Amino acid sequence: MKLIFAGTPEFAAQALQSLLNAGHEIALVLTQPDRPAGRGMSLTMSPVKLLALANGLNVLQPTSLKQAEIQALLADLKADAMIVAAYGLILPREVLSIPRLGCLNIHASLLPCWRGAAPIQRAILAGDSETGITIMQMDAGLDTGPMLLHFPVPIEGGETAQTLHDKLAKLGAEAIILALQHLQHGALPGMLQDDGLATYAAKLNKAEARLDWCLAARVLERAVRAYNPFPVAQGVINGEIWRIWQAAARDEESGQPGEVLRADRAGVLVGCGQGALLLQEIQKAGGKRLSAAQFLQGNPVTAGDHFDLA
């Protein structure tokens, strides 16, 4: 099929590679403009742009798709469909109707649960037992269009946003190929979403990564996993910010919220509103991620020290 592809991060790049491997014609790749990144804040190309250029594809990086000239350019391509995966720009109604078969979105949740920007992290935060990939026919709403295919995935114990992202990226890349196969051989009927079951996956922000020690340890453990690798859970102790990459709830332990109960090779055990949280992998500003045993060699803390309450 002749396709337009719209996506930006690694999640989308895997889908683009899958489409190329399957022999589809990618007439144009839309991706976000290059952004400053790294310590030097130099302009950095998105994973999708890097892959597109490596394969000799035409790339367009508009800040909006509302301009008439861009819409005319898309219409002139006479594409069969547009495939959208974590693109980051809203598609106007005029764009949705341009491809012959419309626009198909690869969404990282089982819609209507977790519509929005951060479905992977919100599913972990909520303690969901499963999530998945939905291939959706896009409409003018926010992830509200008819569902074409559903692929559930269990959320395993210890799953981080990174590990779950990697599973869903692979599955999404496979699912879109299957959806296009169905479309090539006939109709792929859509199922309307039940808006009454919808939940919203708000975009992540750095402020929410500050742990509230008054919450239950199991809630904080999920937060540590959900914010790995971004924005990374944080706590402040003795005036220093600790970034917490890995932790485990200890329901049988108890102490005052934020209080260090003990610190040894197993980790730094911190009291919570219910239970305690064992910090197992820690990083200070400008330092490396270290196991608790390694971290404590250069950053001693003792029982009775206290994390600031959020």
Image (tube, rainbow, N blue to C red):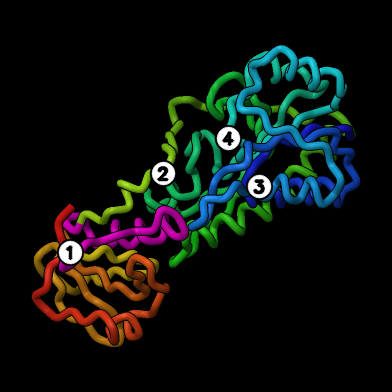
Who's the residue at 25% across and 72% down the image?
250
Residue 89 picture quarter: top right
Tell me residue 115's x, y (percent).
50, 34
Residue that mark 2 sits on: 204
Q: Amino acid at mark 2?
A: Leu
* SS at badge 4: loop
Residue 298, how many percent across, how many down? 28, 83
Q: Nearer the viewer, mark 1 or mark 2?
A: 1
Pick the residue in front: 8 or 280: 8
| Circle 3/circle 1 CB separation < 8 Å | no
User: Which portion, as a residue range, is magenta?
Assistant: 213-238
Residue 145 visible in the picture: yes
* Kind of residue indicated by mark 4: Gly
Label 2 residue SS: loop
**Above or below, 28 relative to 215:** above
Q: Which one is earlier in the sequence, the residue at label 2 or at label 3?
A: 3
- Label 1 vs 2, first from the N-terminus: 2
Secondary structure beneath dot 3 equals loop
| Residue shown at the point (70%, 49%) measured from the top left | 13
Q: Which residue is mark 3?
A: 45
Say what amino acid the circle numbered 1 marks: Gly
Which of the labelled discs sits on residue 26, or is there none?
Answer: none
x, y percent for residue 225: 41, 61
Q: Is residue 106 magenta?
A: no
Residue contact between numbered discs 4 and 1, judged by CB atoms under 8 Å: no
Q: Which sits earlier in the primary sequence, circle 3 or circle 1?
A: 3
